[in-house]
Amino acid sequence: MRVVTAAIAEHGDEIAEPLYTAIGTRIHPGGEKDFDKAVSEALAELELPADLMKYGETEDYDAQLQASHDEALALVGDDVGTPICRVAGTAFFGPVVTPAPKGEDAGRLFDGVLAVASTPGFFELKRTRDQDPNFD
């Protein structure tokens, strides 16, 4: 996240999603265990400067990273994890879904998220995971 935060600071907010996705794709479905390699390859894929890697080992952008983290937790509270999404003025932990739905199924899930987001006093649905992540 230090490298992603540096990339955002130096190349704009719009780089966050593609860079985070490129790194995550290498680590999760790709199985890459070498974090530095995953980040380096993601930077190259997006034609970002390789020297952004240095920020993974410095505190240069830690204040911005902490502020981003604090902003997200201020939306949902400190007793949740990530991901955090915000819809219809309400923020939640989640959704955590595997495999990620596509097409109409994704639309139905989003409609459900909108429904709970618009329900005053709604806080949580949760169950134990019974399968590993599926990135199909």
Image: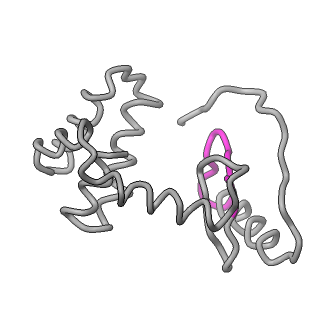
Q: Which region is colored magenta?
A: 92-105
Position of the C terminus by quadrant:
top right
For the residue pair 9 and 119, the one nearer the viewer reads as 9
In this image, 63 relative to 123: left or right? Answer: left
Is 122 placed above or below 131 here?
below
Residue 101 included in the magenta stretch of the image: yes
Image quadrant assignment for residue 124: bottom right
Residue drawn at (32%, 67%), measured in percent from left and top?
13
Secondary structure mostly taken by the magenta-highlighted segment of the chain: loop
Q: Nearer the viewer, residue 79 or 98?
A: 79
Tag count: 0
**Image vertical order of residue 65 relative to residue 126, above or below:** below
The percent coordinates of residue 96 (x first, y second) are 67, 46
Q: Position of residue 104 (x, y in %)?
A: 66, 61
Left or right of residue 114, residue 120 in this image: right
Residue 87 sits in quarter: bottom right
Quarter residue 119 falls in = bottom right
Which residue is located at x 68 percent, y 62 percent?
A: 76
Residue 128, image x, y percentages: 82, 33
Q: Residue at x 80, y 72 (%)?
A: 115
Image quarter hosting the N terminus: top left
